[in-house]
Amino acid sequence: MSGRQRVLLMVVGGLLFLASFALLFTLLSTATVEQGQIVQHLSETRAALARGNAAIEEAIARESAIPRLQERARSMGFISSSGEPVGPPLSLPITLPLRDPGP
């Protein structure tokens, strides 16, 4: 192999090495950008879910307050305007049939 062929082979090898290095750098940079976009999207989704959860917790707290429950019970007819419960009593008197004394 002549000196000129060696130099040409070294130049081609160097160019191939640089091209491989540039390709690897490009692939890694692209993967990093993609992962960054995924993380950003997940962060935005997490923030939106946190806002939604806070709104739901506030609504639950507001709706479960005693005055609100009493107002809803009154509007549904479970409590009269005087504050007395309306509807069947919780315990009813039970009368058992008398035993038949038999013949």
Image (cartoon, rainbow, N blue to C red):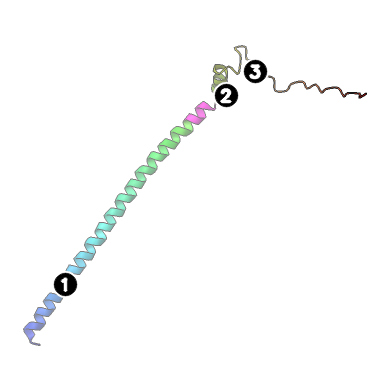
Would you name the residue on which mark 1 appears?
16
- Residue 80 vs 69, above or below: the answer is above
Task: Tell me which amino acid carries mark 1.
Answer: Leu
Task: Tell me which amino acid carries mark 3.
Answer: Gly
- Report the residue at 28% width, 53% height from top: 34
Q: Earlier in the sequence, mark 2 or mark 3?
A: 2
Judge from the rendering whether residue 36 lies leftward or rightward of residue 2; answer left or right: right
Q: Which residue is more in the foreground, 99 or 22?
A: 99
Q: Which mark is residue 66?
A: 2
Would you name the residue on which mark 3 appears?
87
Q: Earlier in the sequence, mark 2 or mark 1?
A: 1
At which x and y percent is residue 48? 38, 39
Q: Secondary structure at mark 1?
A: helix
- Report the residue at 9% width, 79% height from top: 8
Q: Earlier in the sequence, mark 3 or mark 1?
A: 1
Q: Secondary structure at mark 2?
A: helix
Q: CA distance from mark 2 to mark 3?
A: 20 Å
Magenta: main secondary structure equals helix
**Mark 3 in CB contact with mark 1 (< 8 angstroms):** no
Q: Residue furthest top?
A: 82
**Mark 2 in CB contact with mark 1 (< 8 angstroms):** no
Q: Which residue is more in the foreground, 84 or 29?
A: 84
User: Magenta segment range?
Assistant: 59-64
Q: CA distance from mark 3 to mark 1?
A: 89 Å
The crowd level at tag 1 (other Cα within 10 Å; few <14, some 14-19, many 20+) is few
Q: Which mark is residue 42?
A: none
Quarter residue 21 falls in:
bottom left
For the C terminus, the image quarter is: top right
- Residue 10 vs 34, above or below: the answer is below
